[in-house]
């Protein structure tokens, strides 16, 4: 696993984990990486200092933390699936009961929601078996 500091075309900086540099390159070329703040899929590596692992269990700790995050989201939020952009808008505009939700949204949907002022976050969602 490798951690890159990334920046979108709107100059938002964020970090993302990848299996290796080639995985980042292929995902970036396919437009599969989006800014978690604005949804912009035009991202590039930002300059960063090398980070040395403090111990060999860093990858296992990251997997564990992502698993804990997933469990907390699943326990405390309503799953709305592919209806996420629509339901997030309904909540934002007061057309539906305010409640925590999660589901799927394309990078374009996430960008549009952010532009509308809808408070959403993208979470790295590791498969349960990993």
Image (cartoon, rainbow, N blue to C red):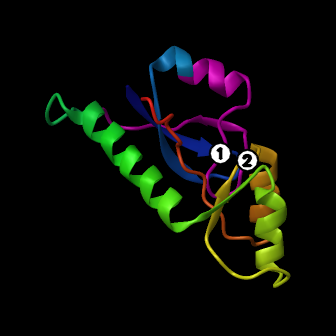
The answer to whether mark 1 and mark 2 are in CB contact below 8 A is yes
Q: Residue at x 81, y 85 (%)?
A: 94
Give the number of the disc on residue 43: none
Q: CA distance from mark 1 to mark 2?
A: 6 Å
The x and y percentages for residue 48 are 40, 38
Q: 75 or 82, which is in the foreground? A: 75
Q: Is residue 115 visible?
A: no
Residue 29: % across, % down: 70, 22
Question: Quadrant location of the N terminus?
Answer: top left
**Quadrant where the image shows the C terminus:** top left
Taken as a whole, is the magenta stretch helix, strand or loop?
loop
- Mark 1 Cα within 10 Å, few/some/many (few <14, many 20+)? many
Q: Residue at x 31, y 42 (%)?
A: 64
**Dot 1 or dot 2, earlier in sequence:** 1
What residue range appears in magenta? Answer: 24-50
Instruction: Examine the rendered structure and indicate whether residue 55 appears above or below residue 124.
Output: above
Name the image quarter holding residue 129. Answer: top left
Query: Which residue is the extreme one toward the left?
Result: 55
Residue 34: % across, % down: 67, 43
Circle 2 — which element? Answer: loop
Residue that badge 2 annotates: 40
Residue 108 in view in this figure: yes
Q: Nearer the viewer, mark 1 or mark 2?
A: 2
Q: Report if residue 18 lies within the magenta region.
A: no
User: Which residue is labeled 1 in the image?
Assistant: 8
Secondary structure of the residue carrying numbered label 1? strand
Q: Position of residue 56 (x, y in %)?
A: 16, 28
Quarter occupied by residue 89:
bottom right
Q: Name the residue nearer the viewer: 11 or 125.
A: 125
Q: Please determine whether, in this image, residue 13 is positioned above or below residue 28.
A: below
Q: Nearer the viewer, residue 2 or 98?
A: 98
Q: Nearer the viewer, residue 64 or 3?
A: 64
């Amino acid at each position: 696993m490798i951690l890159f500091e990334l920046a979108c075309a709107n100059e938002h900086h964020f970090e993302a984990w990848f299996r290796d540099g080639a995985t980042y390159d292929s995902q970036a070329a396919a437009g599969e990486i989006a800014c978690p703040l604005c949804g912009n899929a035009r991202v590039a590596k930002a300059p960063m200092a090398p980070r040395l692992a403090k111990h060999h269990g860093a990858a296992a700790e990251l997997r564990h933390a992502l698993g804990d995050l997933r469990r907390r989201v699943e326990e405390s939020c309503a799953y709305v699936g592919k209806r996420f952009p629509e339901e997030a808008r309904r909540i934002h505009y007061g057309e539906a009961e305010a409640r925590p939700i999660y589901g799927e949204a394309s990078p374009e949907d996430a960008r549009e929601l952010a532009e509308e002022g809808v408070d959403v976050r993208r979470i790295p969602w590791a498969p349960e078996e990993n």
